[in-house]
Image (cartoon, rainbow, N blue to C red):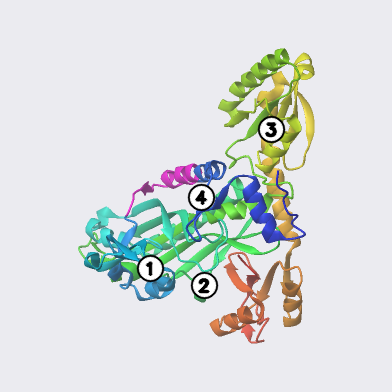
Amino acid sequence: MAQITKRSEDYSRWYQDVIAAAEMAENSPVRGCMVIRPNGYAIWENIQRTLDDKFKELGHVNAYFPLLIPKSFLAKEAQHVEGFAKECAIVTHHRLKQVTVNGKVDLIPDPESKLEEEYIIRPTSETIIWDQYRKWIQSYRDLPLLINQWANVMRWEMRTRMFLRTTEFLWQEGHTAHATAEEGRAETLQMLEVYRWFAEDILAMPVITGAKSESERFAGAQETYSIEAMMQDKKALQAATSHDLGQNFAKAFDVKYQNAEGKVEFVWATSWGMSTRIMGALIMTHSDDDGLVLPPRIAGTKAVIIPIWRKDEEMVEVVAAAEKIAAELRPIVGAIHVDKRDNMRPGWKYAEWERKGVPLRMEIGPRDLKDDQVMMAARHDRNKQAVKIVDLVTAVPAELERIQQDLFDRAKQRLVDATVEIDTWDDFTKLFQGDGGFAHCHWCGDAACEQAIQDKTKVTIRNIPFERDETEGECVHCGNKSIGRVLFSQSY
C-alpha cells in the first residue's frame, strides 16, 4: 500500500493521497477532467438521493436540458456572458476530416462542416432553460415553476484540483420561476437552508450562511447566498450557492405571465446548486493521516464485517455468521459489506477499509462465535468494544449515530477555535501570514477596498453572515466607516 502523506507535511499532497488510497477518483486523459471510481460515485449517489428526496418533498421536479447551448443565448444577459466568457468551451464543427501530414495521419475539423452558429458546452444552464420557460409560462396558473436538473457542466479551469476545481464536474442546478419578488426571495433562502441542513445534518460539516458581496455574486444575480465551510487547514470552501436572479433572465428571454387581474408581467427567477466539489469538502473536513473518514449518513458502505479464520472449517462457520449478521442489519442501517477474501490477512483488510473511510468495522472469529459476540471498531476514533450478537440490532445504529455526532462536534469545535474577531490591519495580516482561519472584520462595503485586500493577502470576503455583529466600526483595511462585520478567509 502506498503511503499517505501527513497533513502536517504537505496538506495538498495529503488530499490527493487520500483520494487515491480510498479509490475515489483519478485523473483522466482529458486535461482537468476526472474519472470518479465506484467508491467515490457511491458517495455521490447518496448525495443525489438525499438531496433529490428533499427537493421533491418541497415540490420540485426533475427535467433535463441540452449540453450544447447556442452562443447567441449566452450573449442575451450581459452580466452572465461577462461572468462566463473566459471559461467556455466552444463547438465549431460537426465533422472531422482525415488528412496526411508529413506521412502521418491526422484528423482536422472539416471546413465544410463549420456550424452556422457555434455552440457553448454548458457552463451553467440559465440561458437555455429560460428560453424553454418562455414557451411554458403564460399565466399565473403556470407558476411557480420548480425544476431541478442533475447534469454535468464544463468550465475551462486553468488550475484544476480533484473534486474542488475540475474542467468537467457533476452537479444539480435548480431553476425556478415565480409570480412575485417575495416568492423568488423566499425560494432562494429556502434552498440555502436545504443546503445548510444537508451540510450539517448529513455531511456533519458546520457552515456559515450568508450573502455574498456584490463582486462575488453569480453573474446575472441580484443576490447570491452561500454556505461556507472550514477545512482542516483553516481555509474556507464555498459548499453551495443559491441565487435570487430577480427579473434579469426573464427580461433577457422575454418570459412573461398574465396575472389574475389580466396584467402581463415578467416572472421572478432563482437558481441554486451543489456540485461534486462538496465531496472535496467532505474529504478535507473529516479525513485523517490514515485515509478517508466518512460520516455514516453519507457513506456508501456503513459498516464492513471481517470474518477471521485459520482453518477451512473455521472459515465456513465465521463467514456464515457474518453473512447472517449483515442480512439482519442491512434493513436497519443500510449497506454492509462482508469481506470474505481468503488471500489477505485481517490486518491488511483493516487498513484497506480504514483508507476507504467505512465508518464501522466488525470482526468475528471462532472465539467470538463461541462467546456469541463481535468486536466492533469505529473508524474515526478507533474505539473498540465487544458486542453480543443479539445486541447488534441496537448497538450498531447507536454507534453509527455516535460517529455522526462526533464528527460534527469535532468539525464545529475546529471552526469555533479558528474563528476570531479582528479590528486592525496588522492583526489581519499576521493571522493570514500565519495559520489563517475565519476572521470577522469590519468592512466599508467598497468593492475597490475588497479587491485591494485580496490583492495584498489572497484573502476574500466569504460572505456577509446572517448572524453577525452589525454595530458600527472602522473598516479593517481602509479605516472608513463600517456598518458591521463580514467573514474573511483564504479559500479554495
Element under disc 2: helix
- Residue at x 67% of width, y 52% of height: 17
Q: CA distance from mark 3 to mark 4?
A: 35 Å
Cα–Cα span, label 4 and label 2:
30 Å
Q: CA distance from mark 2 to mark 1?
A: 17 Å
Query: Is residue 190 visible in this depiction of the protein?
Result: no
Alpha carbon separation for disc pair 2 and 3: 42 Å
- According to the picture, the residue beneath numbered tag 3 turns out to be 398
Mark whose residue sits in front, 4 or 2: 4
Please name the amino acid that badge 3 sits on: Ala
Q: Position of residue 151 (x, y in %)?
A: 41, 52
Q: Quadrant of residue 257?
A: bottom left
**Quarter of the image holding residue 277?**
bottom right
The quadrant of the picture occupied by the N terminus is: top right
- Could you tell me residue 232's position as x and y percent? 70, 58
Contact flag, marks 2 and 3 (Cβ < 8 Å) = no
* Image side of residue 3 versus residue 120, left or right: right
Q: Label 4 sits on what residue type? A: Val
Say which residue label 2 marks.
216
Q: Nearer the viewer, mark 1 or mark 4?
A: 4
Q: Which residues are magenta?
A: 48-65
**Sequence-wise, which precedes: disc 1 or disc 3?**
1
- Please tell me whether mark 1 or mark 3 is closer to you in this view: 3
